[in-house]
Amino acid sequence: MTVAVMSSSKPKAASKSGAERSRRREPAAPRRCLASGEVRPKRELLRFVVAPDGALVPDVAERLPGRGLWLSPRRDMIDLACARNLFAKAAKAPVRVPSDLAEQVAGLLRRRCLDLLGLVRRGGQAACGHEAAALWLSGGKAALLLQAVDAAEGGRQKLRALARAHDVPVIEVFRAEELGQALGRDALVHVALAEGGATARLNEELARLGALVRSDPQSTQR
């Protein structure tokens, strides 16, 4: 499985307008993880709903009708909920849980992140390529750096160091082909993103995806 590698730097705060949009978008009420019992903001959890036919459906966009069932974005929490039949207990009804639930969630989160990346590009808030990304990092314009996980280590390390010097988080979770397709190219290794509402939303989704893949025991990196 392709995994996330995140820098220790904290994401830069979104611009005021982006932060205001984020607050309007999400109610303040937190939710409780079915498996751990931990109460956390909704943006840090995964939502599931039970379809009319009894099938459990991941709702990463939080748009499907029905009562939400919430879990922390960790592989062990998903596995525990399945093993202990927690979805059915919470729903007070029989629930059919797919055997590949964790993989489904990871795939949906990846797709959502890439869709948001395309939204950032359409807003003119993405600098693509090594030179352009380096210029944004050096000039203080970058709020986030994405690098292809399957690219050569040498080039990635140079921009990692530059990002670290400017306190910009680095995310390495997507392949070069995935980044390229999201941004209208054949392939891309380096993408710097400016502050804004779409970048803030992408940061939230990347945090959920990163937590999920890092907690997967089959991951080769943490």
Image (cartoon, helix red, strand yellow):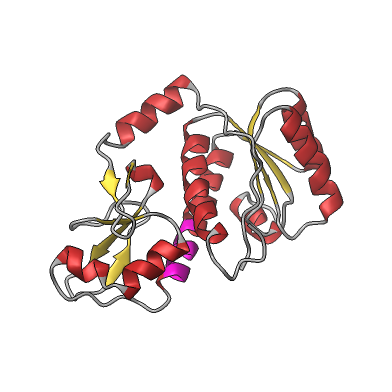
Q: Tell me the residue at 73%/30% (across/down).
A: 137
Residue 9: x and y in percent read 64, 35
Q: Nearer the viewer, residue 4 or 128?
A: 4
Describe residue 146's horizontal placement relative to residue 18 as left or right. Answer: right
Q: Quadrant of the C terminus?
A: bottom right
- Rendering quarter of residue 187: bottom right
Q: Tell me the residue at 39%/65% (across/down).
A: 78
Q: Nearer the viewer, residue 166 or 145?
A: 166
**Total marks drawn?**
0
Describe residue 180's horizontal placement relative to residue 37 as left or right. Answer: right
Q: Tell me the residue at 29%/72% (across/down).
A: 84
- Rendering quarter of residue 190: top right
Specify the farthest residue to the right: 154
Describe residue 49's horizontal placement relative to residue 188 as left or right. Answer: left
Q: Tell me the residue at 67%/59% (across/down).
A: 175
Specify the farthest residue to the left: 92
Is residue 2 depicted above or below 6 in this figure?
below
Residue 146: x and y in percent read 66, 45
Q: Quadrant of the N terminus?
A: bottom right
Q: Is residue 132 visible?
A: no
Q: Is residue 47 visible?
A: yes
Residue 210: x and y in percent read 54, 53
Q: Is residue 198 magenta?
A: no
Describe residue 11's horizontal placement relative to residue 24 as left or right. Answer: right
Residue 136: x and y in percent read 72, 29
Residue interval drawn in magenta: 102-109
Judged by its main secondary structure, the magenta piece is helix
